């Protein structure tokens, strides 16, 4: 069987509204972006894989694109091959020809991609015959959102040709009728290499039948033994063997019910059994799950999925079941379930350890000493308060103090914050206070103009006389962020001072706004960045071009933090 | 503007010629320095002097002076600023940079301390401390001492107030270091922009340089906007504790007395040919040349002109320049390289007599009132075009004669254009590829404006802040230099070492060296250059001359082509100009029947009129009306009669537009010149509106009406894009005439020369071949036994002289290398009997033979394309050893005793003879399509001829029938799309050219229709269309309303049995040569 639109179908499944609009995946080939796959609407507009993106856009400006992800496609294909296990235990993914792998910069022909072999010898009767099997296959996959073409024949080669070039979506080649059935099909159906195909076309040969009529020796001499071999394989004159796909690494547990079940407690029990099986397998390999995916197969219709993540590699069925508990109910609406599968797509090595309880009275040291305990604590807190409520601060690369740190998952490696690699470090020691106020608190300060440090300031009704001061350190706001998101005083350029009062307390204060410059003169607001409004005389929405400083624009003082 | 402060000069000034490090143009920095009251402007770009001339010119205009300097980044030491105090020191700095650049790859400069110490005399150095937060440490103190020891007394240490928190402490530390090392402290502000508002732009430039987005750039960006030029009073306030550091900056600037004006150019004074001083030599050569040109009968008019011109040359001392050009031209002529000069000085009588041009000043009715501007002290301007294939010989001659020390190419500053600016800014702003594409598309074809509507159309939200910021920043970045490239052929030749004038760098091309200044810079300093340009048409004309000499026994040269031949003008009046220089474009072709050129000067006008200048100035139609007598010839004023007399009162040439500015607008010649320059670079400096106001006001004052004034100015703006003066038009017109003459009288030789000079011109070989056949030339297909690499002429009937046929060369075969073709012809002998003979004797790879077979080049052996392919494929297997030995013997026999009597060596059927293969026969349609695939043309039939019946059934008429169709009628047409154009001047209108078996047709597509039918219009190889016919004289257009993609019909031709596949890319120019 062949999934001619697998990449775009994959995207459309994630985002169903994409199904009806032209969509293509794009990849760089020979120095420019080309389409790698197109969906039905795009195809109907005349776009095709291999077409340069620029040409495609000229034809169809509304085209949406997504990057081509061969790895994701391959994973999906493998998953579908497994899914086909319901028809036959023997399935295999069609791997692209070595030539395609050698030149990954080129867009391989679509026909050579995304095929699945099924050997249904002796299986068809279970589904009411070969025709019924094909129909069932197509119906189920179509329901899942995949375009599919399938053919069933005596030889793999003939099935391949018929699936791709047959006149219907499903083709059943009668026994003994291969030669006649293949004769009118194009040569492309023979899985020949591009060079041979091209050469044959130049000789005017287009149909499999025409090729079969040529002298074999001359043909082999000119187009290689492989060409003749492909012909023979398709026609059943030579054997072809295909290796079945290796079984998936066993981070998967499955259960099938004799008849559909729908009661929550039955499902939960089944899930627990699955968890036990999987955890036992993981434990045997000294691994723990970081992520688990549960798939429920209803009798009909698309599978339902849910997933949980853990902060540490875990192989504890009870703990994991608790994490699943809240996720299950939404999945139970609708038809009954006739199969369940639990996968652990993401596991990590887990050092096996005694599942000991933290010792009493050792509360302070335990989390640090025992990361597993910390992990349990974090999971428990997360489940109670919400996972996003338990965080830790990691540095972020920014001059702007409020943005110089960000909240990250408590136990994740710092490099993996928010899924992206960040190698940000904290600014050089001493320059920043240990504790920041959020938000900064207004103070009253007295300072010589235009940018001398304050002589004294009042914070929370208390007067501080400055004994020593350093500054200013001038920080301009990040002009590319939307200024409307912050109040005016918070989006002005700041002069920071480190102050020490007469009691030896140290503060970090700043003045928002400069005395000798209008608020937007250094590209802070829209007025400058867009550069136009002043020239054309139109004032922009926020009215920041007004030259006279209004009271709101007048510099104001804030306390932002404390040094140790 | 600011309160006065102590004298101050910002020495650490970085312009955008420190690529992606400075956010202001040199001009802006110089002007701002003047406005802020700095005692002088200074500029110091990274290892470069590329921006100094612009800064110098702007400083002069702003009433201040420029201190020339450079920032030197050493490979083994701290960075420092270097300011030469006098001409000699400048020469040393320039030499130093040359040294560093010549040893580094393009765009880089490798300098070490030792190099610096060797060139230190006369320079003032300002060492730069490490930037915050790394505090200057003991290591830096040691470095400082070493540098001081190596560089001498004039060595200073810079300190900046960075607003980084601990500035006072940092500067105090630097002051202590400076005192200890004996390098007094100088206040600077490390200015990277002229004003604080450029901060966003500077940030974006940083992102582009670091290849990151604004969101991920983090602390790589500057923390604040303080790195700009500041008023002296502000600097004094920041350095209140170190007033002497501020004063020292001004002192240093005061000691740098070197000005770029000191670079007075000295012409090369190589011994004049024949000895004597240059003027005497020039006069002698000129009069000798005149005797020769006019066969000892020099017309009085010419004598008069020569005396006047020679007097002027003597007065201005330009004789060496003319001698230099003459020498280059003489060299080319000696090598048989065709060349022709153009430019204001080139169309002088002197240049004609020296052989620099072939435009006879006596024969043509042209007035060169001022070939050299005495008022402006501008150096003469001569560009010389050479055959494009042989220009390199000329360039190498110049290098050989003057040496790389004295000759170099001018630079071309590659700047951000709308597209690149948007792309790079958008990337830096983190816009997605889709958004960027949509933006560029919406922006496409427009100069800089992006209307809200077009944005909405492209599916973008015009209110989106990111998008707005990106567009605004892209507009700012437009015109910023990106890198220096080499000028196509502008040579600077000096008397002394060139490296003392400007640093010399390696160009991207091997064997090329380039100075750092471009054409405008050289102009501004009055430095002379000679443009050595390549012109495809000269190659073509020379080849045609050679062919005519060989096959018709007639020797011709540019000046020797019979003048004013009415048959040539008849042909041009019909718009029959495919292949003719300059007038073969679609626009020119439709202009020819309207303008009806009847004499040489008409051609000069023809060449000049279809240009942005006259079009933007709306001058074309008035001129045509007056020419046809539909409108009286009148002059806006008596004073302009002299200026506009030759062109019926309508300004068409750049010279006229400039004269109007002077005569009617009240500009001084020097101001007019400034205006011209401002136009050429208006995007960079953005000062056009001031000029517009001035000129229009000046003209109103003198009694001209506003409309005329505005049009004149628009025209000057048009010239800014691509200035086209009469003097260039005259030289081009000669090539128009000569190529038209060749086309008219020797169509086979002309077509052959055109094909052999490809790529050039407007048309693909298919159109050229077709045009030749339309003109009665017998064209024959490429053949392994008859064709050479180049196309050639052969007797139409073997052995019979007289009529010639054009044999296409193997160069037309797609994918065949010249080297393979040479081997084929070298081993051909009496001819090849079969593909195997060719394979063995020429030693060509089977793949090459397959290429030939695909091109049907074995047809002469009686093998059609498929049979030949079958045969060639069979060669692929390696011969058995036994068999190979036999073949070798046969080969020896063949080589020593070629078969005579026209018989050709044939491969005897060997013991391994195969049964013949029955291959499907090729239909005509298939063969035609295969021809297009392998040759990009077909001699068999036009694809449309094969489809005609089907097309006729659908109501499509042949293009030839358009001429007999009444205007206003609706017609249906179908044809291969040969060109799509969207001229910038046509506000979104698309021009499409269709070709069928009877001729070509011109379509006009209004933007509304284009948007509705984008797909067929852009995607179709074969386009069907319905629309209204419009006719003006002989010019016919079809105004398209419903286009239709008929390409599948072609697929039907190519593969009669397998419809439903996609159309092959038929046309080599498909789809977008003119369409980006």
Image (tube, rainbow, N blue to C red):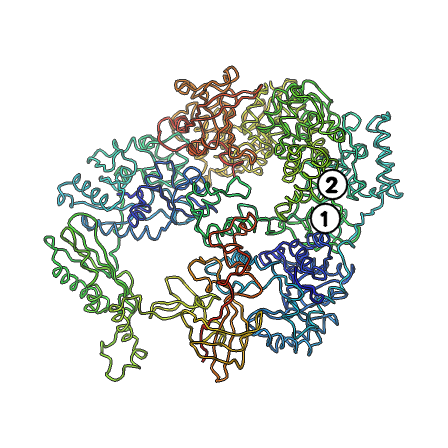
* Left or right, residue B333 beside residue B416: right
Mark 2 chain: B
Mark 1 chain: B
* Left or right, residue B627 beside residue A338: right
**Residue at 30%, 33% in the rendered image:** A185
**Contact check, label 1 and label 2, Cβ < 8 Å:** no
Q: Which mark is in front, 1 or 2?
A: 2
Circle 2 packing at 10 Å, graded few (<14), some (14-19), many (20+), is: many
Is residue B119 something that shows in the picture?
yes
Mark 1 element type:
helix
Q: Is residue B240 above or below residue A143?
A: below
Quadrant of the image containing the N terminus of chain B: bottom right
Of the pair A124 and B518, the residue shown nearer to us: B518
* Left or right, residue B941 beside residue A200: right
Of all residues shown, which one is farthest toward the left?
A259
Residue B238, percent from left and from top? 63, 70
Is residue B338 something that shows in the picture?
no
Of all residues shown, which one is farthest toward the front?
A551
Residue that badge 1 annotates: B522
Residue at mark 1 shares a chain with residue at mark 2: yes
Real-space Cα separation, disc 1 to disc 2, in angstroms: 23 Å
Residue B694, percent from left and from top? 68, 42
Label ID, residue A74 = none
Label ID, residue B667 = 2
């Amino acid at each position: 069987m062949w999934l001619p639109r697998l990449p775009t179908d994959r995207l459309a499944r994630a985002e169903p509204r994409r199904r009806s609009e032209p969509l293509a995946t794009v990849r760089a080939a020979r120095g420019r972006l080309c389409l790698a796959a197109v969906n039905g609407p795009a195809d109907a507009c005349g776009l095709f894989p291999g077409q340069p993106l620029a040409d495609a856009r000229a034809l169809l400006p509304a085209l949406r694109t997504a990057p081509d992800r061969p790895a994701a496609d391959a994973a999906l294909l493998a998953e579908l091959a497994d899914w086909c296990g319901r028809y036959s235990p023997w399935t295999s993914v069609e791997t692209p020809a070595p030539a395609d792998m050698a030149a990954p910069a080129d867009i391989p022909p679509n026909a050579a991609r995304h095929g699945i072999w099924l050997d249904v010898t002796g299986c068809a009767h279970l589904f009411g015959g070969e025709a019924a099997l094909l129909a069932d296959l197509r119906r189920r996959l179509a329901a899942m959102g995949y375009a599919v073409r399938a053919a069933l024949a005596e030889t793999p080669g003939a099935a391949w040709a018929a699936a791709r070039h047959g006149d219907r979506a499903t083709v059943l080649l009668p026994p003994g009728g291969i030669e006649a059935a293949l004769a009118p099909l194009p040569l492309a159906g023979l899985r020949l290499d591009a060079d041979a195909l091209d050469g044959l076309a130049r000789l005017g040969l287009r149909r499999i039948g025409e090729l079969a009529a040529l002298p074999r020796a001359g043909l082999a001499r000119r187009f290689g033994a492989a060409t003749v071999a492909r012909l023979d394989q398709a026609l059943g004159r030579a054997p072809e063997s295909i290796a079945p796909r290796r079984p998936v690494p066993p981070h998967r547990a499955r259960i099938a019910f004799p008849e559909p079940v729908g009661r929550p407690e039955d499902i939960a029990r089944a899930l627990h059994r699955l968890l036990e099986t999987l955890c036992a397998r993981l434990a045997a390999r000294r691994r723990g799950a970081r992520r688990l995916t549960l798939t429920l197969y209803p009798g009909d219709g698309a599978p339902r999925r849910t997933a949980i993540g853990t902060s540490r590699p875990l192989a504890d069925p009870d703990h994991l079941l608790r994490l699943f508990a809240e996720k299950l109910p939404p999945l139970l609406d609708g038809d009954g379930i006739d199969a369940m599968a639990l996968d652990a797509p993401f596991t990590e090595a887990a050092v096996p350890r005694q599942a000991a309880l933290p010792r009493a009275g050792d509360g302070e040291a335990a989390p640090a000493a025992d990361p597993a305990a910390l992990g349990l604590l974090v999971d428990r807190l997360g489940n109670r308060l919400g996972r996003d409520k338990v965080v830790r601060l990691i540095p972020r690369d920014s001059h702007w103090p409020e943005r110089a740190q960000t909240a990250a998952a408590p136990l994740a490696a710092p490099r993996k914050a928010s899924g992206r690699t960040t190698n940000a470090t904290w600014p050089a020691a001493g320059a920043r206070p240990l504790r920041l106020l959020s938000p900064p608190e207004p103070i009253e300060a007295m300072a010589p103009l235009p940018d001398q440090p304050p002589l004294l300031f009042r914070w929370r009704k208390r007067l501080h006389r400055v004994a020593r001061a350093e500054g200013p350190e001038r920080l301009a706001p990040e002009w590319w962020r939307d200024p409307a998101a912050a109040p005016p005083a918070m989006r002005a350029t700041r002069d920071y001072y480190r102050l020490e009062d007469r009691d030896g307390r140290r503060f970090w204060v700043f003045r928002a706004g400069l005395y000798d410059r209008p608020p937007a003169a250094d590209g802070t607001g829209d007025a400058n960045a867009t550069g136009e409004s002043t020239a054309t005389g139109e004032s922009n929405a926020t009215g920041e071009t007004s030259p006279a400083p209004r009271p709101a624009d007048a510099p104001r003082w804030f306390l932002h933090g404390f040094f140790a | 503007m600011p309160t006065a402060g102590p004298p101050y000069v910002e020495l650490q000034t970085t312009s955008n010629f420190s690529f992606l490090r400075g956010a202001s143009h040199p001009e802006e920095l110089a002007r701002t320095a003047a406005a802020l009251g700095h005692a002088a402007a200074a500029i110091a770009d990274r290892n470069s002097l590329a921006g100094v001339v612009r800064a110098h010119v702007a400083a002069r205009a702003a009433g201040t002076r420029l201190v020339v300097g450079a920032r030197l980044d050493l490979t083994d030491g701290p960075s420092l600023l270097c300011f030469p105090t006098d001409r000699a020191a400048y020469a040393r700095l320039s030499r130093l940079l040359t040294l560093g650049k010549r040893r580094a790859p393009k765009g880089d400069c490798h300098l070490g301390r030792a190099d610096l110490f060797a060139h230190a005399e006369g320079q003032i150095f300002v060492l730069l401390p490490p930037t915050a937060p790394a505090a200057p440490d003991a290591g830096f103190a040691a470095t400082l001492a070493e540098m001081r020891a190596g560089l001498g007394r004039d060595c200073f240490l810079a300190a900046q107030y960075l607003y980084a928190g601990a500035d006072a402490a940092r500067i105090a530390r630097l002051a202590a270091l400076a005192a200890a090392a004996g390098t007094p402290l100088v206040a600077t502000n490390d200015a990277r922009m002229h004003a604080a508002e450029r901060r966003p732009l500077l940030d974006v430039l940083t992102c582009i340089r670091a290849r990151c987005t604004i969101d991920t750039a983090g602390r790589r960006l500057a923390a604040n906007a303080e790195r700009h030029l500041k008023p002296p009073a502000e600097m004094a306030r920041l350095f209140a504790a170190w007033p002497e550091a501020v004063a020292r900056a001004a002192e240093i600037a005061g000691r740098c007395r070197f000005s770029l004006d000191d670079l007075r150019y000295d012409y090369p004074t190589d011994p004049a040919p024949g000895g004597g001083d240059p003027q005497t030599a020039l006069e002698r050569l000129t009069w000798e040349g005149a005797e020769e040109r006019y066969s000892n009968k020099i017309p009085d008019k010419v004598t008069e002109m020569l005396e006047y011109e020679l007097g002027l040359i003597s007065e201005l001392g330009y004789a060496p320049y003319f001698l230099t050009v003459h020498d280059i031209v003489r060299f080319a002529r000696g090598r048989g390289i065709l060349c022709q000069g153009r430019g204001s000085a080139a169309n002088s009588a002197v240049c004609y007599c020296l052989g620099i041009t072939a435009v006879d000043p006596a024969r043509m009715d042209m007035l060169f009132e001022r070939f050299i501007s005495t008022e402006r002290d501008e150096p003469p301007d001569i560009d010389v075009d050479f055959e494009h294939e042989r220009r390199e010989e000329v360039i190498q001659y110049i290098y050989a004669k003057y040496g790389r020390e004295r000759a170099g190419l001018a630079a071309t500053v590659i700047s951000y254009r709308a597209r690149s600016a948007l792309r790079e800014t958008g990337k830096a702003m983190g816009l997605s590829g889709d958004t960027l594409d949509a933006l560029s598309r919406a922006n496409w074809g427009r100069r800089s404006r992006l209307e809200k509507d077009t944005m909405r159309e492209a599916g973008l939200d015009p209110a989106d802040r990111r998008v707005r910021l990106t567009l605004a920043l892209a507009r700012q970045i437009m015109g910023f230099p990106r890198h220096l490239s080499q000028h196509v052929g502008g040579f600077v030749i000096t008397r002394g070492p060139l490296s003392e004038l400007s640093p010399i760098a390696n160009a991207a091309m091997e064997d090329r060296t380039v100075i750092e200044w471009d054409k405008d810079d050289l102009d501004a300093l009055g430095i002379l250059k000679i443009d050595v340009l390549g012109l495809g048409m000269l190659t073509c004309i020379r080849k045609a001359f050679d062919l005519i000499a060989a096959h018709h026994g007639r020797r011709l040269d540019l000046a020797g082509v019979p003048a004013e031949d009415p048959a040539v003008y008849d042909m041009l009046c019909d718009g029959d100009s495919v292949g003719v220089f300059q007038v073969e474009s679609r626009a020119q072709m439709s202009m020819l029947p309207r303008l009806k050129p009847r004499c040489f000067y008409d051609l000069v006008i023809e060449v000049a009129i279809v240009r942005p200048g006259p079009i933007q100035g709306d001058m074309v139609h008035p001129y045509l009306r007056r020419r046809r007598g539909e409108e009286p010839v009148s002059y806006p004023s008596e004073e302009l009669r002299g200026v506009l007399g030759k062109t019926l009162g309508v300004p068409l040439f750049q010279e006229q537009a400039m004269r109007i500015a002077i005569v009617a607008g009240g500009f001084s010649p020097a101001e007019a010149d400034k205006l011209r320059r401002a136009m050429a670079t208006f995007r960079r400096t953005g000062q056009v509106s001031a000029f517009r106001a001035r000129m229009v006001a000046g003209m109103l004052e003198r009694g001209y009406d506003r409309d005329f004034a505005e049009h004149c100015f628009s025209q000057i703006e048009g010239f800014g894009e691509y200035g086209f003066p009469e003097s260039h038009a005259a030289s081009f017109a000669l090539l128009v005439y000569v190529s038209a003459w060749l086309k008219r009288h020797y169509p086979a030789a002309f077509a052959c020369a055109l094909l052999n000079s490809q790529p050039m011109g407007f048309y693909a070989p298919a159109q050229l071949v077709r045009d030749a056949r339309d003109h009665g030339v017998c064209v024959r297909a490429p053949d392994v036994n008859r064709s050479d690499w180049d196309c050639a002429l052969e007797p139409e009937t073997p052995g019979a002289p007289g009529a010639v046929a054009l044999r296409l060369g193997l160069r037309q075969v797609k994918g065949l290398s010249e080297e393979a073709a040479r081997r084929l012809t070298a081993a051909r002998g009496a001819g090849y009997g079969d593909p195997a003979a060719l394979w063995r004797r020429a030693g060509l790879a089977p793949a090459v033979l397959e290429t030939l077979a695909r091109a049907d080049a074995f047809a002469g052996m009686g093998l059609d394309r498929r049979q030949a392919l079958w045969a060639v494929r069979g060669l692929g297997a390696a011969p058995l050893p036994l068999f190979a030995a036999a073949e070798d013997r046969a080969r020896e026999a063949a080589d020593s005793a070629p078969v005579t009597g026209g018989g050709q060596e044939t491969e005897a059927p060997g013991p391994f003879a195969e049964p013949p293969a029955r291959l499907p026969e090729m239909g005509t349609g298939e063969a035609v399509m295969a021809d297009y695939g392998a040759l990009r043309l077909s001699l068999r039939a036009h694809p449309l001829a094969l489809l005609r019946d089907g097309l006729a059934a659908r109501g499509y008429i042949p293009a030839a029938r358009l001429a007999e169709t009444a205007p206003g009628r609706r017609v249906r047409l179908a044809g291969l799309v040969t060109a799509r154009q969207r001229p910038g001047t046509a506000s979104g209108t698309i021009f499409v050219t269709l070709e069928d078996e009877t001729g070509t047709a011109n379509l006009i597509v209004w933007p509304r229709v284009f948007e509705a039918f984008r797909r067929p219009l852009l995607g179709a190889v074969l386009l069907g269309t319905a629309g209204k016919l419009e006719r003006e004289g002989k010019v016919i257009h079809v105004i398209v309303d419903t286009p239709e993609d008929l390409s599948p019909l072609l697929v039907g031709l190519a593969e009669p049995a397998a419809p439903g596949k996609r159309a092959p890319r038929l046309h080599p120019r498909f789809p977008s040569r003119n369409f980006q």
